[in-house]
Image (tube, rainbow, N blue to C red):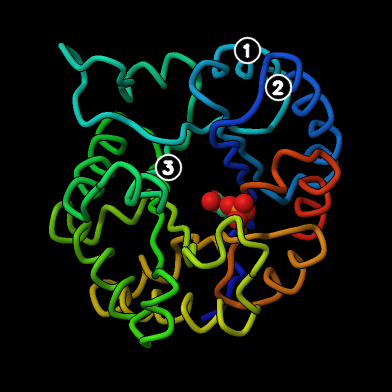
Amino acid sequence: MTQTTRQILVMGNWKLNGNKAMVADLIGALKAPAAECPNVAVAVCPPVLFLGQAQTLLADSLIALGAQDVDLNSVGAFTGENSAAMYKEFGVQYVLVGHSERRTLHRESDATVAAKFAVVQTAGLTPVLCIGETDAQFEANETQAVVERQLQAVIDHSGIHAFNNAVIAYEPVWAIGTGKTATPDIAQKVHAAIRTFLAGFDAAIAAKVQILYGGSVKGASAAGLFAMSDIDGALVGGAALQAEEFAAIIRAGA
Ligand code: PGA
């Protein structure tokens, strides 16, 4: 399947990093590279506390805003949580669901992730569904079974049409924050398998959905990944905190 109709999307997941000065510096430094590459969609996901600051700083740019997680509930006695409706007030467009750190550290099940995906979509925002296998699952050749199970949970909950307005991020857990990027060939094989799996339900949706790769993407590795026919961008952690690295990834998608 070709990538001709799919735009490259480069998204930075800042995780639990940053302060007001860093938010201002980083966003300031990303505006020019993003503007130079208008064919690349760019988004950043700062910690919730900095969404307001980021929204103001991004007002005159094409860089979109994302959040890293969402609560299942829209309002009420849920101490410490944030709702999709709150994100909307801050101009958020994308919300990550099911990042492996949430699945592992917060015990989020496939069913919980699928429910969060639906909550984001119902609010009119775009869920970015993170999927991927652990090191042990990779070694046991279970990658395809794992990502299909994670996708199936969303299809069971919301139906295949939910992928009409969603992004998928394939992030092998063994590559996240480890410096071990999947080779373009390994990543492409999984991305193609994801698209084939979705095509079993709806070929048009499968051909249209953006599938990002995530896991130690750097400026130097991005072009090789983006050259693959089923890789439509990157979800970037560590390198998204360094303006020059993130800018290089954006340029690699142009
Ligand atoms: P990394 O993180 O680029 O630091 O590996 C990617 C992610 O967790 O989204």
User: 223 above or below 99?
Assistant: below
User: Nearest the camera: 199 or 215?
Assistant: 215
The label on residue 53 is 1
The image's mark for residue 96 is: 3
Callouts 2 and 1 close, C-beta under 8 Å:
yes
Position in image of residue 32 (x %, y %): 86, 34
Above or below residue 7? Residue 224 is below
The kind of secondary structure element at disc 3 is: strand
Name which of mark 2 and mark 3 comes first in the sequence: 2
Distance in Å between CA atoms under marks 2 and 3: 19 Å
Left or right of residue 61, residue 4 in this image: left
Which residue appears at 27% of the width and 29% of the height? 71
Q: Are marks 1 and 3 in contact (CB under 8 Å)?
A: no
Which quadrant of the view contains residue 77? top left
Amino acid on which disc 1 is placed: Gln
Inspect this view and state whether residue 226 appears.
yes
Label 2 is placed on what type of residue? Val
